[in-house]
Image (cartoon, grey):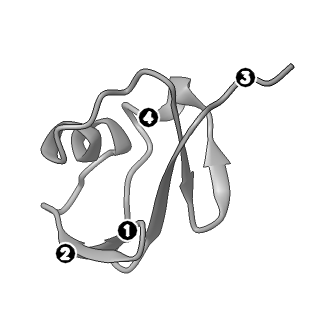
């Protein structure tokens, strides 16, 4: 199925979860946040949050400020 990752089309297997997408893209899960269809998904849900065809996934860096 197709999803859009940071404005780039990506093909992923059906029943893919966020953690699987992170692994497929060879991303580090440290210091990132994930939004699916403009909703930030809590890190505890990444292993069981199912992606759907045509989802828009945004990965962004978490930066602490002061």
Residue 1: give its label: 2
* Residue 6 vertical placement versus 64 (above, below): below
Residue position marked by numbered label 4 in the rendering: 46
Choose top left, top right, bottom left or bottom right for residue 51: bottom left
Mark 3 vs mark 2, CA separation in Å: 35 Å
Q: Earlier in the sequence, mark 2 or mark 1?
A: 2
Q: Quadrant of the N terminus?
A: bottom left
Mark 1 vs mark 4, CA separation in Å: 14 Å
The reply to whether the C-beta atoms of the residues labelled 2 and 1 are less than 8 Å apart is: yes
The reply to whether the C-beta atoms of the residues labelled 1 and 4 are less than 8 Å apart is: no
Residue sticking out furthest to the right = 66
Q: Is residue 25 left or right of residue 40?
A: left
- Which marked residue is nearer to the observer: mark 3 or mark 2? 3
User: Could you say which is closer to the camera, residue 29 or residue 66?
Assistant: 66
Q: Earlier in the sequence, mark 2 or mark 4?
A: 2
Mark 3 vs mark 1, CA separation in Å: 31 Å
- Residue drawn at (28%, 40%) of the image: 22
Residue position marked by numbered label 3 in the rendering: 64
Image position, residue 58 (x, y; %): 49, 59
Residue position marked by numbered label 1 in the rendering: 52
Q: Earlier in the sequence, mark 3 or mark 4?
A: 4
Q: Earlier in the sequence, mark 3 or mark 2?
A: 2
- Residue drawn at (65%, 64%) of the image: 38
- Which marked residue is nearer to the observer: mark 3 or mark 4? 3
Q: Is residue 52 left or right of residue 40?
A: left
């Amino acid at each position: 199925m197709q999803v859009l990752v940071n404005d780039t089309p990506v093909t992923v297997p059906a029943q893919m979860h966020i953690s699987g997408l992170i692994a497929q893209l060879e991303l580090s899960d440290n210091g990132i946040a994930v939004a699916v269809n403009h909703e930030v998904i809590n890190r505890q849900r990444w292993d069981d949050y199912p992606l759907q065809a045509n989802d828009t996934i945004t990965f962004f860096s978490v930066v602490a400020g002061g």
